[in-house]
Image: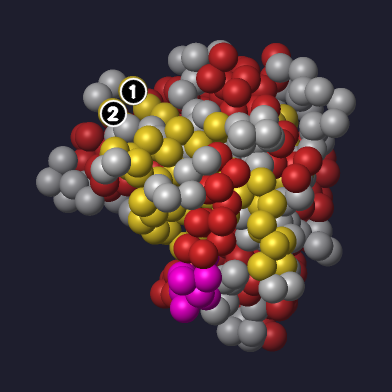
Amino acid sequence: MTVVKEDARAESIARRALASWGLGHAELNLLKYRENAVFKVSVNGVCNSVLRIHRPSYHDREALQSEVLWMQALNNAGISAPRVRPTLNGDPVTEITDTDSTYLCDLIDWIAGVPLDSIDEETDTDSAKLVEAYQVLGGIAGRVHNQSSAWVPPANFKRHSWNAEGLIGDHPVWGDFRMLTVLTSQQLDLLASARRKLRAELDELGENPLYYGLIHADMLTDNILVDGHTFSLIDFDDCGYGWHLFEFATPLFFYLGEPIFDDLRSAFVAGYRQQRDMPDEHLSHLDAFFLARGFTYLGWLHTRKETGTAKALTADVVTAVLALAEDYLQA
């Protein structure tokens, strides 16, 4: 279920899934259809929940149940995150079989607020608002890492890893950049050289629990909802084990080369350090994680090549990652 023309099919699956919560006659409105299909659910004109239809093959039931457990633990620690509603049978997810695929679906409480990325649109007129938001975002990242460092998941906890293999190994989480057909042989050679150097740096860093653990892994501004002074972290679809600096690289990546980048980086780091230590010595590896993030985006562009988002972003992302690779090799 990866193309927009299947919206009607997604709504049919959503309608069947809602019966698991006794909401078969609720009103459905599609919010987004990218990685997953996400619907706003309203009863008697009042929206109070969101239904997610997860794409097949990315997560199994155990991984989704683990996602729910971590979101619950974050809420218990005072970090606003989605709360999943159990089905009438008390399960966190329900399964819907349609033709040749089985879809895992869950229902989460509606979270009030507007996406933080709406502030991005005001950047030209009030960049100070965006810088302030990034300091808050850094603080949220620090609190999340404090919680995950102290939390002991149950024995059956299962999430994928954004480790060296998951980022740039032979079978990366988001796909192999080498399969992206728009890359020339010369560009592939450049990226291969940068990948070898990056792998050596990641291996040398190791997975020290001071700087590596359970992370959100997609802390983009559109995954933060702002309601007054309350910031809520949403979309844990990619959460897993990885370096804390990967968390830094994600919200900053698409500002690389922009005039505001240094201010946003400083703000994010300052906010983070208000909550958790990040020594300069370790922070000096951040450029490596910008490149690692870039490799994941190249992989995503290949595996999601049929989507409008991939088609719109491919040229710009390829240009950005090639520049990162060149700079990284010359450093």
In the image: residue 8, left or right of residue 124: right
Specify whether residue 111 is in view. Answer: yes
Nearest the eye: 110 or 247: 110
Query: Which quadrant of the figure has residue 49?
Result: top left
In this view, 47 is above or below 324: above
Q: Say what secondary structure mark 1 lies in.
A: strand
Badge 2 density bin: few <14, some 14–19, many ≥20, Cα 10 Å: some
Residue 47 point in image, percent of width and height: 33, 40
Q: Which colour scheme is used?
A: secondary structure
User: Residue 233: image x %, image y %?
Assistant: 46, 33
Which residue shows up at 80% across the image and 32% down it? 157
* Image location (x, y in percent) of residue 166: 76, 52
Q: Is residue 152 rendered magenta in the image?
A: no
Say which residue label 2 marks. 227
| Mark 1 surroundings within 10 Å by alpha-carbon count, few (fewer than 14), some (14 through 19), many (20 or more) | few
- On the picture, is 260 further left or further right than 87? left
Secondary structure predominantly adopted by residues drawn in magenta: helix
Q: Which residue is at the far right? A: 155
Front one among 96 and 175 = 96
Q: What stretch is highlighted in magenta?
A: 3-10
Of the pair 237 and 303, the residue shown nearer to us: 237
- Residue 230 marker: 1
